[in-house]
Image: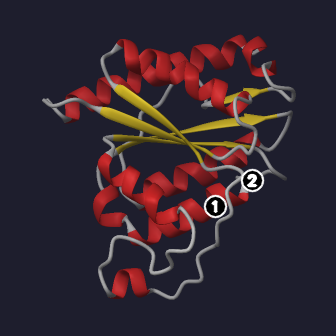
């Protein structure tokens, strides 16, 4: 078994905010298990949505035909990773614009290279809408036939100001369990 890696795509435009802090809790467990980690800041980047042209599939590109934003770079990072975390704050009971663009364009063009990778959602909300964001992220993992480990609760934390999620002790426990379960699945799949 070679070195395993997990990449987290942070859909929050707030660098170092609550979403990043939740990712950090998962990463601490993965790193303790010998798995390398990388956080990619996608929130705050200018990206285009999918226009459903179908050229990525028709030409079997494993990338979007449009190359004027970082989506193809991010899809390439997904392709190289063993595990993928999609993390988003809750924006009007849904994922951020950047996360939606990544889901649509990488999901549409990358089904071949996402197949049976390990994936997990991480969600942050001020108060409500987190379950809908969780479900939106889960559909990406399902439609691309990825393997999704569970945790002791849904992978979400609550907080508004940076650092507020650190007061959510149940969220911290959930993220730690998610990291442990993700590490276990990755090691079993790559044994």
Residue linked to disc 2: 94
Q: Residue at x 50, y 57 (%)?
A: 140
Give left or right: position of 170 versus 40: right
Task: Give the image location of residue 145, x and y in percent.
Answer: 36, 56
Q: Residue at x 39, y 71 (%)?
A: 63
Callout 1: few (<14), some (14-19), or many (20+) C-alpha neighbours within 10 Å? many
Vertical arrangement, residue 17 with respect to residue 48, above or below: above
Vertical arrangement, residue 181 with respect to residue 77, above or below: above
Give left or right: position of 40 versus 83: right
**Quarter of the rendering occupied by the C terminus:** top left
Residue 49: tell me if it is visible.
Answer: yes
**Quarter of the rendering occupied by the N terminus:** top left
Task: Give the image location of residue 155, x and y in percent.
Answer: 60, 31
- Asked whether the residues under the numbered discs 2 and 1 touch, taking CB atoms below 8 Å apart as contact, a structural biologist would say yes
- Asked whether 53 or 3 is in front, the reply is 3
Residue linked to disc 1: 100
Task: Give the image location of residue 173, x and y in percent.
Answer: 59, 13
Task: Give the image location of residue 114, x and y in percent.
Answer: 34, 56
Q: Residue at x 51, y 88 (%)?
A: 53
Image mark for residue 84: none
The quarter of the picture where residue 51 lies is bottom right
Q: Secondary structure at mark 1?
A: helix
Please say which color scheme the image uses. Answer: secondary structure
């Amino acid at each position: 078994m070679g070195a395993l890696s997990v990449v987290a795509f942070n859909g929050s435009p707030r660098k170092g905010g609550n979403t990043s802090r939740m990712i950090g809790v998962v990463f601490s467990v993965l790193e303790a298990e010998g798995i390398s980690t990388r956080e990619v800041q996608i929130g705050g980047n200018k990206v285009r949505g999918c226009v459903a042209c179908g050229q990525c599939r028709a030409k079997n590109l494993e990338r979007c035909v449009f190359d004027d934003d970082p989506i193809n770079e991010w899809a390439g990072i997904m392709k190289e990773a063993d595990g993928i975390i999609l993390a988003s704050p809750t924006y009007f009971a849904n994922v951020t614009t950047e996360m939606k663009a990544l889901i649509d364009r990488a999901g549409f063009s990358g089904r071949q290279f996402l197949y049976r990778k390990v994936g997990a959602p991480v969600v942050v909300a001020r108060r409500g809408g987190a379950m809908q964001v969780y479900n939106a992220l889960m559909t990406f993992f399902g439609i691309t036939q990825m393997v999704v480990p569970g945790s002791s609760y849904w992978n979400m934390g609550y907080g508004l100001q940076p650092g507020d999620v650190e007061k959510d002790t149940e969220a911290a426990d959930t993220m730690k369990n998610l990291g442990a379960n993700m590490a276990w699945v990755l090691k079993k799949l790559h044994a």
